Amino acid sequence: MNQPPAWFDITALDANRSREFYGQLFGWEVRVDASMDYGLTQTPEGVAGGIGQATEDGPHPAGLVMYFPVADVDAALGRAEALGGSCAVPPWEIPGLGKMAVFRDPDGNRVGLWQR
C-alpha cells in the first residue's frame, strides 16, 4: 500500500469506556491529555491514534476515522469533492503536528487527511 494510514481517531459516546475496552482488547497504552479529554495511543504496529469524547455540538460524531497522509490537505480535499465526496470537517491546524480535514466519500464513509 503506497499510503498506509498515518493516524486513527475513535470518537466514542463514552471515551473512558472505549479507552479501557481498546486498551484491554489490543494491549494499547492510552495516555489521556486531560485538557482535550483525548487519549493518545501508539499501537505495537506503530500506527498512532487516539480516542476522544463525542459531543452533541462537536464536528466529530461517534465512529472511526482513518487519516491518510497527503502533501496538501486543501488540494486533496478539493480532489475528493471533485470526485463526488463532500467535506465533513474543514481543514484545521494542529500546532506542531500539521493540518487535518475529514471528508465523506460517495458512500458517506468519513475519511481523514493529514498534512504534516
Image: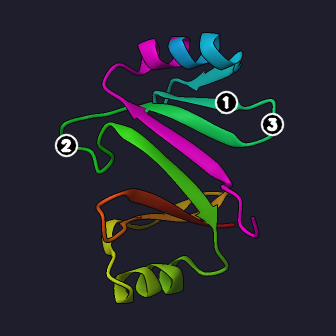
Q: What element carries label 2?
A: loop
Residue shown at 71% from the left, 59% from the top: 4
Q: On the rendered image, what quadrant is the C terminus found in?
A: bottom right
Q: Which residue position is annotated with label 1? A: 41
Residue 94, horizontal then vertical, whole percent: 56, 57
Q: Identity of the amino acid at label 3?
A: Glu
Front position in the image: 94 or 104: 104
Q: Which residue position is annotated with label 2? A: 57
Residue shown at 80% from the left, 40% from the top: 46
User: Which of the numbered marks, if any, corresponds to residue 99?
Assistant: none
Front position in the image: 35 or 89: 89
If you read the primary sequence from the N terminus, does the residue marked by circle 3 or circle 2 appear first? Answer: 3
Q: Which one is closest to the eye, mark 3 or mark 2? A: 3
Q: Is residue 81 above or below residue 23?
A: below
Q: Which residue position is annotated with label 3? A: 45
Q: What is the magenta range?
A: 1-20
Residue 34, horizontal then vertical, whole percent: 51, 24
Q: What element carries label 1?
A: strand
2 and 1 marks in contact (CB < 8 Å): no
Residue shown at 81% from the left, 36% from the top: 45
Q: On the rendered image, what quadrant is the N terminus found in?
A: bottom right
Q: Residue 9: within the magenta?
A: yes
Real-space Cα distance between discs 3 and 2? 33 Å
Q: Identity of the amino acid at label 1?
A: Thr
Q: How many labels does the image show?
A: 3
Query: In the picture provided, is 55 more to the left or to the right than 7?
Result: left
Front position in the image: 34 or 70: 70
